[in-house]
Amino acid sequence: MSLTYAPAGDTTADEFAGSIELTDVSMEFATRDKTSIRAVDPTSLYIPTGQFVSVLGPSGCGKSTLLRIIAGLVAPSTGSVTIGGDEVKGPSRKVGIAFQTPSLLEWYTVAKNIALPALMGRRHARKTDIDRRVEELLNTVKLASLGEKYPSELSGGMRQRVAIARSLITEPAVILMDEPFGALDAITREHMHDELLSIWRDTGATVLFITHDIAEAVYLSDRVLVMSPRPGRIVADITNELPRPRGTSTRSLPEFTRLTSELRVHINH
């Protein structure tokens, strides 16, 4: 089953800038015995600019593979991906990525870790402008006084906030997140949910969020996609109309319980 969604009506360039469109995207990997494994079945999908979409599914279903294809880190076996109407042919400044492991450079300060993508990709950007952007992001992720600290001096939640800030340094239209809170304790994780929603609201970026946690997906998202076991395919596309802004009381709403139950049924089938 593949699902296709198209933008409705006329859109301005800004409204379209963070849109993600997959057309018949599939992925096969070659094995050492010269056979192949299909990780993702042909999938078509449209995500409009500014939407927060989570992807749920069992381990090995192709969630992370799909994210890496959208990021331009791997090329699909078939099909194409566009972001803002431009075909994805490799990593782009339009896209910020945060993984489960922050992967910070231990010998760089927090500020230098955040600045790294901008410094690597800069052409005409001045270092003073990058430094100013780093200061803004340190404030955004509530680490304003820690720019000169090193990753080893930070807690797990702080390190993940640095990784999120780094994903925002190029002011991307799209943020891709692969289980960024999977290694955090429950209390820190819930705090990071609210931090992420605040950042999303402030930036207006499109977010694609990979998770195994049904409640996390419901709390964060406008829309939840469920993938089948390998070869991965989208078996459900659920709209989440829980009111925003969300907070502690959201998790006690009857609709929250109903949505988590509905998603659990789809995953178990």
Image: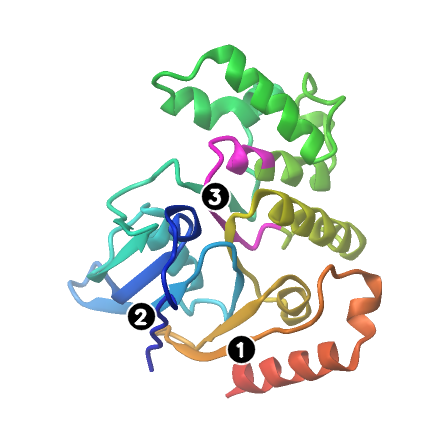
Question: Of circles 1 and 3, which is in front?
Answer: 1
Which image quadrant for residue 202? Answer: top right
Gap in angstroms between the C-alphas marked 1 and 3:
24 Å
**Is any atom of residue 76 visible in this view?**
yes
Q: Which mark is residue 238?
A: 1
> Toward the viewer: 269 or 208?
208
Indicate the amino acid at tag 1.
Ile
User: Which of pointers 3 and 2 lies earlier in the amino acid sequence?
Assistant: 2
Q: Is residue 53 above or below residue 178?
A: below
> Toward the viewer: 129 or 10?
10
Q: Secondary structure at mark 2?
A: strand
Indicate the amino acid at tag 2.
Ser
Q: Which mark is residue 32?
A: none
**Is any atom of residue 65 visible in this view?**
no
Question: Of circles 3 and 2, which is in front?
Answer: 2
- The number of numbered discs placed on residues in the rendered structure image is 3
Indicate the amino acid at tag 3.
Ile
Q: Secondary structure at mark 1?
A: strand
Gap in angstroms between the C-alphas marked 3 and 2:
22 Å
Q: Residues within 10 Å of mark 3 (few under 14, many from 20)?
A: many
Q: Is residue 89 left or right of residue 114?
A: left
The boundaries of the magenta stretch are 165-180
The residue that label 3 is drawn on is 97
Q: Is residue 3 left or right of residue 152?
A: left
Q: Residue at x 58, y 43 (%)?
A: 203
Q: Is residue 133 left or right of residue 193?
A: left
Q: Secondary structure at mark 3?
A: strand
The residue that label 2 is drawn on is 44
The percent coordinates of residue 160 (x first, y second) are 64, 40
The percent coordinates of residue 53 (x first, y second) are 52, 63
